[in-house]
Image: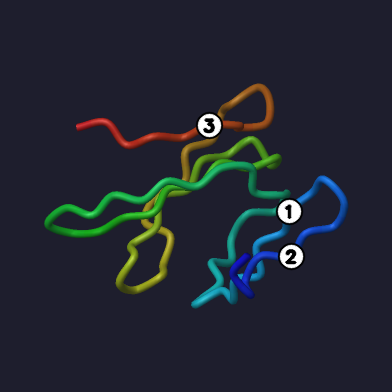
Amino acid sequence: QPPWIKREGLEYYFLVKANFTLTGHTGGVNTVNFYNGDKPYIVSGSDDKTVRVWDYQTKQIISTLDGHSSTVTAVMFHF
């Protein structure tokens, strides 16, 4: 097995170092999606009941979508 995969019993852990951290959610992040178009974006959904859209190049929040009544568990770009 590759050195970046660790196995403990029946569970596998991926040992991957993060390239950067996006700071903004106040709860745990449940889902992330990436769009690689003319301008790349990241979108994330959280326990804080928000969806945040990030500029991939600057790593800054460009929009916060609030008003969800519960945690956000799935996000997806659709154009």
Is label 1 or label 3 in front? 1
Which is more toward the observer, 6 or 32? 6
Q: Amino acid at mark 1?
A: Tyr
- Identify the residue shown where x is 56% and y is 28%: 67
**Which quarter of the image is occupied by the C terminus?**
top left
First reached walking from the N terminus: tag 1 or tag 3: 1
In the picture of the structure, the residue carrying the numbered disc 1 is: 12
Q: From mark 3 to mark 2, how far is it between C-alphas?
A: 27 Å
Question: In the image, is 14 to the left or to the right of 22?
Answer: right
Q: Residues within 10 Å of mark 3 (few under 14, many from 20)?
A: some
SS of the residue under disc 2: strand
Q: Amino acid at mark 2?
A: Lys
* Tag 1 and tag 3, C-beta contact below 8 Å: no
- Identify the residue shown where x is 18% and y is 59%: 39
SS of the residue under disc 1: strand
In the picture of the structure, the residue carrying the numbered disc 3 is: 74
**Which quarter of the image is occupied by the N terminus?**
bottom right
Residue 54: quadrant of the picture:
bottom left
First reached walking from the N terminus: tag 1 or tag 2: 2
- Identify the residue shown where x is 17% and y is 53%: 37
Residue 75 x, y percent position in the rendering? 46, 35
Q: Amino acid at mark 3?
A: Ala
Residue 6 x, y percent position in the rendering? 74, 65
Q: From mark 1 to mark 2, how far is it between C-alphas?
A: 6 Å
Which is more toward the observer, 15 or 40? 15
First reached walking from the N terminus: tag 3 or tag 2: 2
In the picture of the structure, the residue carrying the numbered disc 2 is: 6
Give above or below for 2 relative to 24.
below
Q: Residues within 10 Å of mark 1 (few under 14, many from 20)?
A: few
